[in-house]
Image (spheres, grey):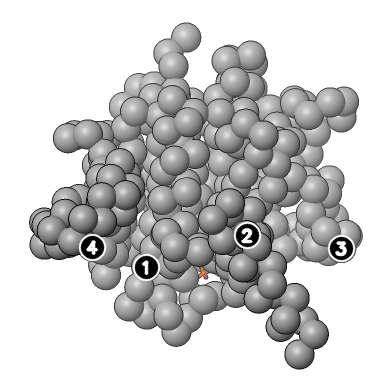
Amino acid sequence: MKPVRKAVLPVAGLGTRVLPGTKTVAKELLNVVDRPILSYVVAEARAAGIEHFVFVTGRGKGAIEDYFDHHIELEAQLKAKGKTDLLEEILSELPKAGEMSFIRQMQPLGLGHAVWCARDVVGDEPFAVMLPDMLMEGPTPPLAQAVKAHEETQGNIIVVEPCPPGEAHKYGVVALESQSGRLNRMTGMVEKPPKGTEPSNLFISGRYVLEPEIFAILESQEKGAGGEIQLTDAMARLMKTRPFHALEYEGVTYDCGDKIGLLRANVALALKRPDLGAEARAAVEALLKA
Ligand code: UTP
């Protein structure tokens, strides 16, 4: 079986839940502590063995390409001022030449359409999809857990997690053949099911490993929930002929596309940082007492 070498990162959305900042700054470049959300997601992908990153971008998102390129003046300044630690940190994030591709979606018609835009660069091999506004951490990086599950099942993997009680109708939710352990064969999935009709409390949380057959299905996929071309609808069609498993991953997700999720990510990651944790804790405690 072919290994998972490529990851598609759709970054063409408008980020309306975190406006007005996202009017001019790509949501995926908003900082969590001191680096863009995207920086964490790319590190997670590298830890899973990803060798090629396919960004699906749109108008006003050019800064994403710039983030992963040299900044000659900045690098010269840091060098001249002897700030070698910072310089090394910045250089360590740069891709090798040819490791990243950028494709324009042109119109944000939905996640399914964004993934379809990557078809020629991905080609005929299994690939990961990572929603870059979902910052995910775990004892082993969540995408690495998904890649391992793909090796075990030789099929499509959807990473899921339990949603807070009564909230399943807000998400893409999976239906399982039976539930034992963390990796279970799926029988269906539905995007934003009407309240009371949810097939489980497990929602699709932002990491997938998909077989390339999904592209032919996306080509003819009609608009679904919210008037968008939904990846969930295309996966549900592919499931009729190919196996899908839901992986309840070990770890935690911060939905950085949401105001409170972004705040949680900033606080949680600052508290965990060896260089900032103590100061961050003191600051948060002082705020809570005020
Ligand atoms: P979201 O629905 O969370 O992103 O899509 P959004 O549309 O930017 O957010 P809101 O709801 O308006 O606040 C998940 C990911 O898919 C990308 C987004 O950039 C985001 O990273 N996406 C979404 C696309 O690339 N193209 C689309 O047409 C839609």
Which tag, 1 or 3, sits closer to the chain's start? 1
- Mark 1 in CB contact with mark 3 (< 8 angstroms): no
Label 2 and label 3: CA atoms lie apart by: 34 Å
- Residue at left offset 26%, top offset 67%: 59
Left or right: 242, with 171 as reference point: left
> What is the quadrant of residue 235 in the picture?
top right
Label 2 and label 1: CA atoms lie apart by: 27 Å
Label 4 and label 1: CA atoms lie apart by: 9 Å
- Which of the two marks, 4 or 3, is nearer to us in this view? 4
Between 272 and 93, the residue placed more toward the observer is 272
Label 4 and label 3: CA atoms lie apart by: 39 Å
Write down the residue under mark 3. 166
- Residue type for callout 2: Gly
- Residue type for callout 1: Ala
**Residue 111 placed where, x, y %?**
47, 53
> What is the quadrant of residue 184 in the picture?
top right
- Residue at left offset 60%, top offset 47%: 136
SS label for mark 1: loop
Q: Specify whether residue 109 is in view.
A: no
Dot 2: few (<14), some (14–19), or many (≥20) neighbours within 10 Å?
some
Write down the residue under mark 2. 277
Which tag, 4 or 1, sits closer to the chain's start? 1
Q: Say if disc 1 is inside 8 Å of ligand 1.
A: no
- Mark 2 in CB contact with mark 1 (< 8 angstroms): no
**Residue 113 placed where, x, y %?**
41, 51
Dot 4: few (<14), some (14–19), or many (≥20) neighbours within 10 Å?
few
- Residue at left offset 69%, top offset 72%: 282
SS label for mark 4: helix
Write down the residue under mark 4. 62
